[in-house]
Image (tube, coloured by chain):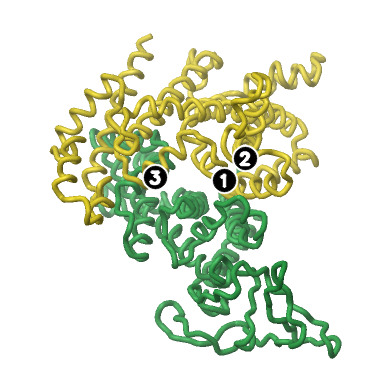
Chain colours: A yellow, B green
Amino acid sequence: MKYIVRRAIRAVVLLFGVSVLCFLFTEMAPGSFFDEMRLNPQISPDTIATLRARYGLDRPLLVRYGRWLTAVVRGDFGFSIAYNAPVAPLLLVRARNTLLLTTTAMMLTWVIGVPLGVWSAACHGRWFDRIVETGNSLLISIPEIVIALGLLALAVRSRSVPVGGMMSINHDELSAWGQLRDILQHLLLPVAILVLADVAIVVRHVRAGVVEVLGAPYVRAGQGLGIGRARLLFRHVLPAAASPAISLFGLSIASLLSGSLLVEVTTGWPGLGPLLLEATLARDLYLVIGGIIFSALFLIVGNFIADLFLLTFDPRIRTGGLNAE
Amino acid sequence: MRNSVRVRVLILILVCLHMAVLFAGFFAPYDAREQDRDLPYAPPTRVHFIGASGFDFRPFIYAAVSDSDGYGEDRTREYPLYFFVKGSTHSLLGIFKSERHLFGVNSSARIMLLGTDAFGRDEFSRLCFGAQISLGAALLATLLTLATAAVIGTVSGFYGGWIDEALMGLSELFLLLPWLYFLLGVRAFLPLHVSPTGTFLLLIGVIGLVGWARPARLVRGVVLSARNGNYVSAARGFGGSDLYLLRRHILPETLGVLFTQAALLIPLYIAAEATLSFFGLGVSEPVPSWGNMLAALQHYNDLVSYGWLLAPAAALVVTSVIYGMLADALHPRRS
């Protein structure tokens, strides 16, 4: 319990740090949202000054930061200039779409990755293992942007999956079942890209853990006692080997909001990514800061969950038996 | 033993690759900005050996002509391929001016090994020159990251105390940042419209300063264990100053970690440059980089109709895989 409180305090401090960092960067930035307007001779400098004053951009840094903090406490994370609306609702809608995409991808990644890793370790050194290892090394090296463009090209060429967006144009006219099907079809491509980009690292972690445990004396004892191969692997070896994979699982939870930016932009998925990219290009500061804080919050909470997982699942850490941790 | 041979071979290949990139102007038949508005989206030129006069060891090409359904070859005239020809002026290593190119054809035809882009610019030449930007940015950004990490990690590990606490707290903050968002954010707050050199340096700075946290922590670990080593205590006992200890005993210990991290970071940074430029936040036109060349493919239809424009993606894969193999060989997993 004490541990949890300490972690929570630490998380709040870290979030403060991130927000301060963001504001310091905005202060260093020479441009602003109204730069393009300044080039327009029809808009007088007075109008721009008024607009700047309305959004509070003419105040000193500390005042702006204070105002922003009160906005956070109020729950709206400041005001987006481009959308003329509070930031939080904008982010929430997009975050929902992002989470739909990333949780699906994450579940698939783990459902594929864990058995593959265990089997590959069980056939350590044989052809199946070699193939998996080579495929892994390749997939880990290939940049995500290349995977995205490659699958995109395949999808567009084969015309078998819809590309771009989250719904078809006629989405509203479909039945409830049809709407679900429509969204699932649109999910296929971005999920496939994410799974391909992430599955290799899962396989590698699981495999390394299992290979290490397989050499332990109690595994040989289990074999000697006549425990079946599958049962031995999944019931006895996997839990003992799970620590690195569980840490990784926490990291995947942590990156649920921020890990899919590239995929969202390339496939046109209406998640946080495209919103933030637009905000970046338009210099809509509070929207950018809000997005960064949102995903940082997720990262911190994800890491925290990972630690809790480790505590619950690995008794060796609780009792201090695994002094490496 | 086998592993160390593999490391050497891979490093040799990479050094050759980077050296070749330095001489991009020699390998590229045309200038990266040279447009031919009559030949937009031309497919790759086919190199022939068998022509009207039968087989010849000197390859030749036919000029590309646009017809009703795309491009065809003008079979009436053969343009033999010559090596070490004179062409447009380029600078080698930024110092020497040269007109020599590895290969080329008579100037009334164009050889486009990887086709052309929307402005009729030779994709192969752009790939060569783009490599200078992409690989150069990644290398310099890696240097910046490792230098920062070495300094912070060493100070943190060697002096300990509150300095250590503060620096490691800061590194935890950087580890927690969603890095792509952070890159976007940092880039958002910096000027959008600056000269290509400016963006290049900016890109290096932004990418290089984001990734220092992990290597700094690793360096700190190495420094910590080295600092407590008997030989360091002995040297201290003989009256060695802090600077002497760091230079002679501690920094050499960190080289291994730094080297492995370099092999991991360079491909990551190549991809980071490509991603940022793909989003339009990196090096801007007309200067080519692998990322902004790929940005032309943001329209789905171009991706299918003009598949040769994916060439930078292939180049990304090749370099990343070589670096990945190097990282694997340098850091063999326990299995």
The one nearer the camera, B63 or B89, is B63
Q: Quadrant of the C terminus of chain B?
A: top right
> In the image, residue B138 lies at what x, y percent?
45, 57
Nearer the camera: disc 3 or disc 1: 3
Report which residue position mark 3 lands on: B184
Residue type at the position of mark 1: Glu
Q: Is residue B88 above or below residue B208?
A: below
Query: Badges 2 and 1: C-beta atoms under 8 Å apart?
Result: yes
Q: Is residue B288 left or right of residue A185?
A: left
Going by the numbered disc 3, the residue's amino acid type is Leu
**Residue that mark 2 sits on:** A193
Q: Nearer the viewer, residue B196 or B153?
A: B196
CA–CA distance in space, label 3 to label 1: 17 Å
Numbered disc 2: what chain?
A
Which residue is outermost to the right?
Answer: B54
Instruction: Please give the residue where the numbered disc 1 appears in the rendered image.
Output: A144
Q: Work out whether B265 lies above or below B128.
A: above
- Quadrant (top left, top right, bottom left, bottom right) of the N terminus of chain B: bottom right
Query: In this view of the protein, which residue sits in the foreground, B246 or A34?
Result: A34
Question: Secondary structure beneath disc 2?
Answer: helix
